[in-house]
Amino acid sequence: MQITVDAWDPSFADNSESPRKADSAEVNAEVEVPAKDWAPLDAPGTGPTRILVVDGVRRLDARIELTDETGRWPGLCVSWAAGAVACDLEGGASAVTETAVERGLFSPIDPGTDFGQYPYRKSDAAEAAELIAAAQTAMASLEAKVAAAVATHAELSVLDGTLRGRTRLPNAVGYIKSHHRSYLRGAMNGVVEQLRPGQRTPVFHLMTTWPRYSWYLRLPGMSSKGWAGIARIEAADALSEEAAIALADATAAALPPLGSAAHKDPRAPQNLTPIAGLERRLKRKLGDPRLLLKAVRASASEF
């Protein structure tokens, strides 16, 4: 086996969201109210007082190439971390309660030994983008483990990103900051733009490649027009309609006060303050990328 490491800085690699298959969306807009009655909904007067915010970060440390007499295959050395922040909404305090770091060499072929600090993780993918998607799945799995370890102590668990693959966690929602497509049509889509800070849309059932409940919520910010400050939130399909609506009310009461400020975070207000702080801490836990790349190159030279 011969292994080579790309000479260029891996930070220039495509570290974007994993590719998604084109899919059609089926929407049942009448989970909470009839479609004709759709309108912005105010947050309830009371909500959860203790919530858990879970997030993960991922970094590509090195691209490698593995070659033997049968062919040539790509590989990626990736580091990822996940953590949870417990937020006491009554006392205004928050604290990181759990963190974990993992690394892996993603490749369709096993080099036969752990590659430095990167244990082999088999992936049938032949393209770098697909290997990145495999690493993203591993990070989501770690986030679910971290959340499961502490979720019983929270009334609401907010997982940054889609809830896919993490639907078994109690009282959990997925928190999506970016909108790559619009799932609602016509007047219902217009309701999203009408939301004032702290208001949400009615709950709807969404089916793409997987089923879940969803709703939109506007966070407080500098603008209340268009889609500024809008987050989409997901809940597990296994819930009853009543339970999904209760979670929607809980997010409308609990999340707006956690919205970040524009002068502190360019992704404000959707990037909740606990998420922004946790991301900074997790990135430090990933270690020095220069030292890790040096170790990868040293391991490659031994083959």
Image (spheres, grey):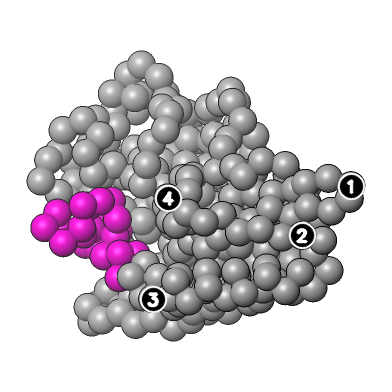
The residue pinned by badge 4 equals 12
Main SS, magenta residues: loop
Residue located beneath label 1 in the image: 70
CB atoms of marks 3 and 4 within 8 Å:
no
The residue wearing badge 2 is 2
- CA distance separating discs 2 and 1: 12 Å
Which of marks 3 and 2 precedes in the sequence?
2
* Three-letter amino acid code of the residue under disc 2: Gln
Looking at the image, tell me whether mark 2 or mark 4 is earlier in sequence order: 2
Label 3 vs label 1, nearer the camera: 1
**Vertical arrangement, residue 274 with respect to residue 228, above or below:** below
Residue 81 located left or right of residue 47: right
Q: Amino acid at mark 4?
A: Phe
Residue drawn at the location 40% of the way across and 70% of the way down: 283
The foreground one among 254 and 298 is: 298
Crowd class of label 1 (few under 14; some 14 to 19; many from 20; radius 10 Å): few
Q: Which residue is mark 3?
A: 284
- What element does badge 2 sit on? strand
Residue 165 seen in the figure = no
- For this rendering, which residue is in front, 28 or 15? 15
The part of the chain drawn in magenta is 255-277
On whether residue 275 falls in the magenta region, the answer is: yes
- x%, y% of residue 251? 36, 56
- 3D distance between C-alphas at marks 3 and 1: 40 Å
Is residue 177 depicted above or below 295 in this figure? Answer: above
Q: Is residue 255 left or right of residue 208?
A: left
- Taking 6 as reference, is 34 left or right? left
| Label 1 element class | loop
Mark 4 / mark 1, whichever is N-terminal: 4
Closer mark to the observer between disc 3 and disc 4: 4
Q: Is residue 111 magenta?
A: no
